[in-house]
Amino acid sequence: MAYKLWYWPTIQGRGEFIRLPLEAAEIPYADCAREQGADALVEEMKRRDETGQGPFAPPFLGIDGTGIAQVANILMFLGERHQLAPSGMADRYWLHQLQLTIADIVAEVHNVHHPLAMMDYYEDQRPEAARAAQQFRDERTPKFLRHFEQAANANVGDCLIGNRWTYADCSLFQLVEGLRYMFPRRMKTLEPDYPALIHLHDCVAELPALAAYLKSDRRLPFNEQGIFRHYPELDGE
Amino acid sequence: MAYKLWYWPTIQGRGEFIRLPLEAAEIPYADCAREQGADALVEEMKRRDETGQGPFAPPFLGIDGTGIAQVANILMFLGERHQLAPSGMADRYWLHQLQLTIADIVAEVHNVHHPLAMMDYYEDQRPEAARAAQQFRDERTPKFLRHFEQAANANVGDCLIGNRWTYADCSLFQLVEGLRYMFPRRMKTLEPDYPALIHLHDCVAELPALAAYLKSDRRLPFNEQGIFRHYPELDGE
């Protein structure tokens, strides 16, 4: 039975980190809220909430009547079930550790646009976002990218572990794409320092099923309602 | 061989989420930086960094020459190895999902005190922290606590799953403790709405080994360098 992916229908957001490995591995799934609308997602959240074991927030994956939430958790599940992760214990924990560090930078990206109040609009906290963006751009981004560069360099292959892409390779691809959209000028300066990470990104982009997905209309464009947003005033070299 | 826990020596911080289940289950560990100082932690970070598979940040757990980082990842490892988590697949993912949601609120707690620049001092962003605290206190805290209340209610026992405490029970104990320290007035208002969560907290507090730990000098007091901080000006009913 195809997985039921539930996520907001008009943004890449955190849902994209789930879509990418599903697409790259050609695992059948329904992108439910894109088919049925955001109201259906809200209804599904309510229904699951009443069980006491619902998700705190999207995305979540419906599996045979039950469900699983939190991006890194869903990815670990898909990794185990579809061989999108190594089977050795040490490698599994290392990969999950990396994925959780990717989750950390994604949360910091969200904070850049919502420093004061995560539920309020960017437009209501612009001066504060400018200050938040500066430290994120100048200090946090290189610190995280350096970490992922070292991770990419720790393996001789074109991917994080062994010689096959994993769910975390897909997430690093998305992180680079997102940061390029968010901070094109800053990324132009930074990218030459992280050749192994960029090579890993390029290898993921060339996976045939993923390349087809990226060209399809299933791949939503980045926009200013998602996690990675482009406000030129927040970018800088 | 005893685990080597590495974390900042003067705060509970994220390290406390690891200390608690180690203490509650009486698993031998060395709290390395408390024995050797913060400089030793920085040195250990550098040494691991050079392997390409080091931690992005503390805490991390040294295990037989290798290591594992990210709180939820370390807890999953300890849960599997020491039966501090259920063995069934669905329960394992559910518990990890909850733990990642606890990580989310802990990150939001950090943001309250560092809304503009996570590496800068609270004192340099006080007016902004006041605005951040308001939404966190009024909207986010009840939303998260309600979620954990439902999780506690979904099991008939005095814990999250089955009839024995798990690593996530320990984390919910710590979350309640931390929020009480951070927002005593707000928590006084909120707690009556979450009886199952408070009951779970109390059951963890009464675990004999944990009760002994909490009374020992190994339990650091909360303070204004940690994650949960008490600034009276940020509290409110």
Image (spheres, coloured by chain):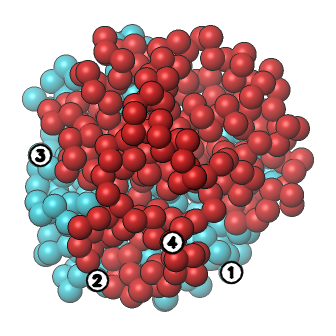
Chain colours: A red, B cyan
Q: Residue at x 44, y 51 (%)?
A: A19
In front of the other: B101 or B224: B101
Q: Residue at x 57, y 71 (%)?
A: B141
Q: Quadrant of residue A4?
A: bottom left
SS category of the residue bearing label 3: helix
Residue type at mark 3? Arg
Question: How many other residues sit within 10 Å of disc 4, few (<14), some (14-19) or many (≥20)?
Answer: few
Residue type at mark 1? Glu
Quadrant position of the N terminus of chain B in the picture: top left
What residue does disc 4 label? Answer: A35
What residue does disc 1 label? Answer: B237
Task: Specify the subunit that label 3 lies on.
Answer: B
* Image vertical order of residue A160 relative to residue B234, above or below: above
Pair 4/1: label in front: 4
In front of the other: A17 or B148: A17
What residue does disc 3 label? Answer: B81
Establish whether labels 3 and 1 are both on one chain. yes
Give the distance between the C-alpha atoms of the residues marked 4 and 3, in whole angstroms. Answer: 42 Å
Task: Specify the subunit that label 2 lies on.
Answer: B
